[in-house]
Amino acid sequence: MEKMENIDEKEVKNCSQEETDTEETVEEVVEGNDENIDCEPAFKIKSLEGKLKEQEEAYMRINAEYANYRRRTAEEKSTIGLYANEKVMTSLIPVIDNMERALDSFEDKENPLYTGVEMVYKQMMDALSDAGMKEIPAEIGSDFDHNMHMAVMQEPSEEYEEGKITMVMQKGYSLGDKILRATMVRVSC
C-alpha cells in the first residue's frame, strides 16, 4: 500500500508506456515487473485478496482437523486407560465370588481367620473400585433391567408385581459403561 501512495512522475510514465505497449497483457505486467507500479492495482488487490481468502480457508480447515484429531486421541487415551485392565478384572470376578462364599461359610464372625479374609476381600474390592469396576445394583423388589441383569428363572409371585427381581443369584460387575458380567436374577412373572 505504501508503494502505491508514494507514486512519483517517473513511475507514472512507466505505467503509461506499459498501457500503450500492445505486446504485454495485464497478467504479464502484474506478474512480470515488481519494480514498476502496476497499472491495474485493483486487479492485483482482488487477486491477492482471493489468494488470502483461500489460504485462510485452508488454515481454518487444517486447524479444525487438528482440533478434532486432538479430541479423538484424548478420548481414545481415556478409553484405553479405563479398559486396559478389563481382562484382569474379568478373571478376578470368580475370585471375588469364592472369597464371598468363604466369608459366608464362617459361622464364627469373631474368628481371626474370618477377619483376615474379610480384610483381604475389602482391600481387593477397593483396588478394583479405584480402577473403575463397580457392582451392578440389583435389589429384591426392584425393576428388572435387561441391559444389566440376566434373568435365569421366572416365578409367579403374589408379593411382587410382574418384572420385579425376587432373588439375586450372582452379583454382576461393570467397568465404566461396559458390563463385565451381568447380575443373574430370578424375576417375577
Image (tube, grey):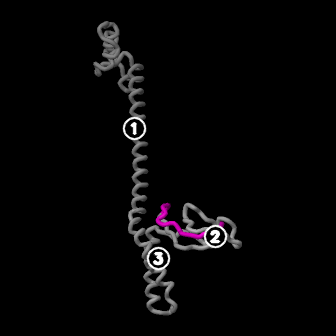
Q: Residue at x 31, y 6 (%)?
A: 22
Point out residue 32 in the picture as x, y percentages from the top left corner. 28, 19
Q: Nearer the viewer, mark 3 or mark 2?
A: 2
- Most distant residue in the right direction: 158
Q: Residue at x 46, y 65 (%)?
A: 180
Q: Is residue 177 above or below residue 20?
A: below
Nearer-the-camera pick, 103 or 130: 103
Range shown magenta = 176-189
The type of residue carrying mark 3 is: Asp
**Few, some or many residues within 10 Å of mark 3 (<14, 14–19, 20+):** few
Instruction: Locate the N terminus by quadrant.
Output: top left
Secondary-structure class at tag 3: helix
Secondary-structure class at tag 2: strand
Residue at the spot of label 2 = 155
Could you tell me how far apart the alpha carbons at marks 3 and 2 are, in whole angstroms?
25 Å
Q: Is residue 178 magenta?
A: yes
Q: Residue at x 42, y 68 (%)?
A: 90
The type of residue carrying mark 1 is: Tyr
Q: Residue at x 46, y 83 (%)?
A: 102
Query: Is residue 58 shown left or right of residue 28?
Result: right
Q: Is residue 30 magenta?
A: no
Point out residue 126 in the picture as x, y percentages from the top left corner. 46, 75
Q: Is residue 27 above or below residue 73?
A: above
Residue at the spot of label 3 = 97
Name the N-terminal-most of marks 3 and 2.
Answer: 3
Q: Are marks 2 and 1 in contact (CB under 8 Å)?
A: no
